[in-house]
């Protein structure tokens, strides 16, 4: 299921749109007397619909406002202004709509998988990866097993972390885009519709796996300790999450491989990570190739 939400930091394109909307309201009040309140409220509705990202309702509201303006004024400047605004809204919505989407994941299956002792015997770092996409159900279970919330009343995770800092974030790279796992909602936030798995490709690797899980530590979540201590804790916490991923893969006829090889500078730039965020590990994940299962 897909739903949409406003991100914590509003994009520059949305800020630009808000400026146009508010200036539209001011211009409307200046240009109209008897009809100014009606159009003012219509413009407020347009703005509210844009904030929640309901593009189709947004476009219909803009046309409604334009119709009101058509009957209420002969001011050519105002009409040109609103026609330009309509085009800008439509264009910006098309761009913004490509990101900031939140995909709700299915409830994790906590009864599935193999017995734990068998899983230990099967755990291995894979060297051959399948290119078939991991389905949403399996991805949901994998992410919950990796670092999901298993004690909701205490907001505790499946993976331990130093001082319960919960410093590890999981970024998912696949052919559909780049996602950030949101444990509190058990959902995926789409960051970019771009296949950037090549950032993790080795020169001697012929096949890029269907999914790469990037483990990023935000050491600002550690409230005590020197920098060197925080980096040690970050590495240990990432290892905990990585092992959860690898054990899940072994339990579900999948293969995983933890790696430190990646273009860290390019990744930090592309994801716009903060100074306190450090990519620690990436995990290649895929289904086992058929010939390896037989």
Image (cartoon, grey):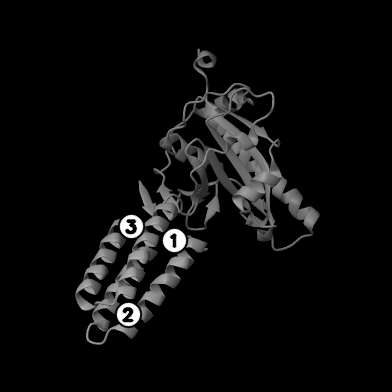
Residue 47 percent location from the top left of the image: 35, 69
Mark 3 or mark 2: which comes first in sequence?
Answer: 2
Disc 3 versus disc 2: nearer the observer = 2
Residue where numbered disc 1 is placed? 6
Which of 211/70 is in front?
70
Label 2 crowd (10 A; few <14 / some 14-19 / many >=20): some
Residue in view at x 42 percent, y 58 percent: 92
Q: Position of residue 164 (x, y in %)?
A: 63, 55
Residue placed under numbered mark 2 in the picture: 28
- Determine crowd level at label 3: few under 14, some 14-19, many 20+ residues with C-alpha closer than 10 A: some
Nearest to the eye among marks 1 and 2: give it: 2
Q: Position of residue 147 (x, y in %)?
A: 55, 46
Q: Residues within 10 Å of mark 1 (few under 14, many from 20)?
A: few
Q: Secondary structure at mark 3?
A: helix
- Residue under the point 51% across and 46% down: 179
Image mark for residue 138: none
What's the CA distance linking mark 3 and mark 2?
23 Å
Q: Which residue is mark 3?
A: 55
For marks 1 and 2, give the CA distance. 27 Å
Relative placement, left or right, of 40 versus 238 is left
The answer to whether 129 is drawn above or below residue 244 in the figure is above
């Amino acid at each position: 299921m897909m739903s949409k939400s406003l991100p914590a930091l509003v994009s520059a394109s949305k800020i630009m749109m808000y400026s146009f909307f508010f200036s539209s309201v001011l211009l409307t009040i200046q240009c109209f007397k008897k009809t100014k309140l009606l159009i003012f409220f219509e413009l407020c509705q347009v703005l509210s619909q844009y904030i929640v990202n309901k593009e189709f309702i947004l476009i219909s509201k803009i046309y409604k406002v334009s119709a009101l303006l058509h009957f209420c004024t002969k001011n050519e400047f105002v009409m040109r202004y609103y026609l330009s605004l309509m085009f800008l809204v439509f264009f910006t919505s098309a761009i913004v709509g490509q990101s900031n989407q939140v995909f709700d994941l299915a409830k994790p299956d906590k009864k599935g998988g193999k017995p734990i002792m068998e899983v230990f015997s099967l755990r291995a770092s894979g060297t051959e990866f399948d290119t078939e996409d991991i389905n949403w159900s399996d991805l949901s279970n994998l992410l919950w097993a990796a670092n999901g919330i298993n004690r909701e009343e205490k907001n505790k995770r499946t993976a331990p972390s130093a001082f319960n800092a919960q410093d590890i974030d999981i970024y998912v790279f696949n052919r559909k885009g780049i996602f950030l796992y949101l444990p509190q909602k058990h959902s995926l936030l789409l960051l970019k519709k771009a296949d950037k798995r090549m950032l993790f490709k080795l020169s001697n690797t012929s096949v890029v796996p269907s999914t790469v899980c990037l483990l990023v530590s935000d050491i600002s979540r550690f409230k005590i300790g020197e920098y060197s201590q925080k980096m040690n804790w970050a590495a240990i916490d990432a290892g905990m999450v990585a092992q959860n991923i690898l054990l899940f893969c072994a339990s579900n006829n999948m293969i995983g491989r933890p790696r430190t090889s990646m273009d860290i500078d390019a990744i930090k730039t592309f994801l716009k990570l903060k100074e306190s965020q450090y990519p620690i590990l990436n995990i290649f994940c895929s289904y086992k190739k058929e010939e390896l299962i037989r």
